[in-house]
Image (tube, grey):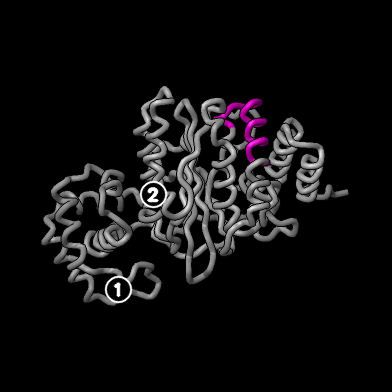
């Protein structure tokens, strides 16, 4: 149970894709603020509560706002995570809070960074490495919503609690989508792993982690391990002769049987026991999953879900009810905790006043 009663919901947020970097003067200021607020929250509630907060899109967005970054830009994700990682540097053992990963090439070093801390925490780091890898695989391949991951931050505590904040971009729409995970809420990596899903926009998606995709997951794993590669390739070539209806999300143009031959032989030889194990195999990516999904639906008659996992929402909502009514309780709890953390921080009075002023600017007017 959360010590502060803050709801345990994680999810997805859509944000306009902005380029460029935060100015050095702003980033250095964000680092200091992030460090002080984190120290205050961990001191009062512990490192587990800090990662619960960061795993919640509402609170994450509010945190970015008071650090001084653009409230609706996709850059708040990469900049906030970078400032937090830099801010806790050197304090990890004292806080019991560790931050790995980041943007671009840095994200690919996440497993190595987790393992580097392995000797300083009393838990086996391998489950943390696995959680990092499979969460990225899920949001890139099992959920195909048009957003390619380019940022992955993995946060964990000395006791093994963890959270993920990762972001993908859609180059055609110029929007980014942020994915939040909270380890304590995940009971199955491939069945509704997001406790709640928040977004500004929705569209078509191949959603193999939807609850209703369970039969498709079982069928897909069976195809990969139980059908001979040559039979699977034959099915793919037959499917390419079909005219799929326009409502269908997956296109036969996505199928390239010849290029999939090697990976299908590999999956058959390695005999994955279930969909999660299949998804975790090296070389199994979005194209392989799309092809197997089409075989599941068109050959075996077991369709996956095409429900976009995102729900209409953004930050704390809009005062005019668009895109959804304000969740006032969550909004007020975010402001209250941040206000207390700022008050207890070691910031100078001028910095505290400026930060609290930004926080006050987020408050909603009370109805008469």
Q: Which mark is residue 134?
A: none
* Residue wearing tag 2: 108
Q: Which residues are magenta?
A: 33-49
Query: Distance between the Cα atoms at labels 1 and 2?
Result: 30 Å
Left or right: 263 in relation to 320: left
In the image, farthest residue toward the top: 122
Q: Main secondary structure of the magenta part?
A: helix
Q: Which residue is mark 1?
A: 253
Q: Nearer the viewer, mark 1 or mark 2?
A: 2
Where does residue 81 sit, x and y in percent of width and height?
55, 46
User: Badge 1 local density, few (<14 within 10 Å), some, or many (20+)?
Assistant: few
Instruction: Check contact, mark 1 vs mark 2: CB within 8 A.
Output: no
Q: Residue at x 15, y 51 (%)?
A: 268
Residue drawn at (75%, 56%) of the image: 319
Residue 179 or 110: which is nearer the viewer?
A: 110
Whether residue 208 appears in this view of the structure is yes
Return the residue found at the far right.
368
Q: Position of residue 104 (x, y in %)?
A: 44, 55
Judge the density around disc 2: few (<14), some (14-19), many (≥20) Cα neighbours within 10 Å: some
- Which quadrant of the structure image shows residue 37? top right
Of residues 240 and 70, the one nearer the viewer is 70
Q: Earlier in the sequence, mark 1 or mark 2?
A: 2
Name the residue nearer the viewer: 85 or 295.
Answer: 85
Position of residue 110 in the picture relative to residue 311 (left or right): left
Task: State yes or no: residue 53 in magenta.
Answer: no
SS for dot 1: helix
Q: Position of residue 28 (x, y in %)?
A: 64, 47
Q: Quadrant of residue 34?
A: top right
Against 299, residue 186 (above or below) is above
């Amino acid at each position: 149970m959360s010590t502060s009663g803050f709801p345990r919901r994680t999810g997805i947020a859509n944000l306009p894709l902005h380029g460029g970097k935060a100015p050095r003067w702003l980033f250095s200021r964000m680092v200091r603020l992030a460090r002080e607020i984190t120290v205050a929250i961990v001191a009062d509630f512990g490192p587990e509560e800090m990662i619960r907060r960061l795993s919640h899109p509402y609170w994450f967005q509010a945190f970015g706002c008071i650090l001084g970054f653009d409230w609706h830009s996709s850059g708040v994700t990469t900049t906030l995570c970078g400032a937090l990682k830099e801010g806790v540097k050197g304090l990890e053992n004292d806080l019991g809070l560790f931050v790995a990963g980041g943007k671009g090439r840095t994200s690919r070093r996440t497993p190595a960074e987790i393992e580097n801390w392995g000797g300083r925490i009393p838990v086996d780091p391998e489950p943390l490495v696995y959680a990092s890898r499979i969460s990225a695989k899920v949001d890139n391949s099992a959920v195909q919503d048009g957003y390619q991951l380019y940022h992955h931050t993995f946060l964990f505590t000395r006791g093994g609690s963890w959270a993920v904040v990762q972001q993908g971009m859609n180059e055609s729409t110029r929007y980014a989508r942020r994915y939040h995970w909270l380890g304590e809420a995940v009971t199955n990596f491939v069945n509704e792993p997001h406790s709640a899903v928040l977004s500004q926009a929705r569209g078509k998606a191949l959603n193999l982690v939807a609850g209703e995709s369970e039969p498709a997951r079982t069928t897909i794993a069976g195809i990969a391990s139980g059908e001979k590669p040559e039979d699977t390739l034959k099915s793919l070539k037959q499917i390419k002769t079909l005219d799929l209806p326009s409502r269908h999300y997956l296109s036969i143009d996505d199928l390239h049987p010849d290029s999939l031959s090697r990976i299908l032989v590999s999956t058959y030889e390695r005999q994955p026991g279930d969909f999660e194990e299949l998804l975790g195999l090296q070389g199994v990516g979005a194209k392989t999953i799309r092809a197997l999904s089409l075989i599941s639906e068109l050959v075996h008659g077991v369709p996956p879900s095409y429900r976009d996992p995102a729900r209409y929402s953004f930050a704390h909502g809009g005062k005019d009810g668009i895109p959804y009514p304000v969740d006032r309780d969550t909004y007020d709890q975010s402001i209250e905790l941040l206000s207390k953390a700022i008050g207890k921080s070691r910031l100078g009075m001028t910095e505290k006043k400026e930060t609290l002023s930004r926080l006050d600017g987020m408050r909603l007017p009370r109805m008469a």
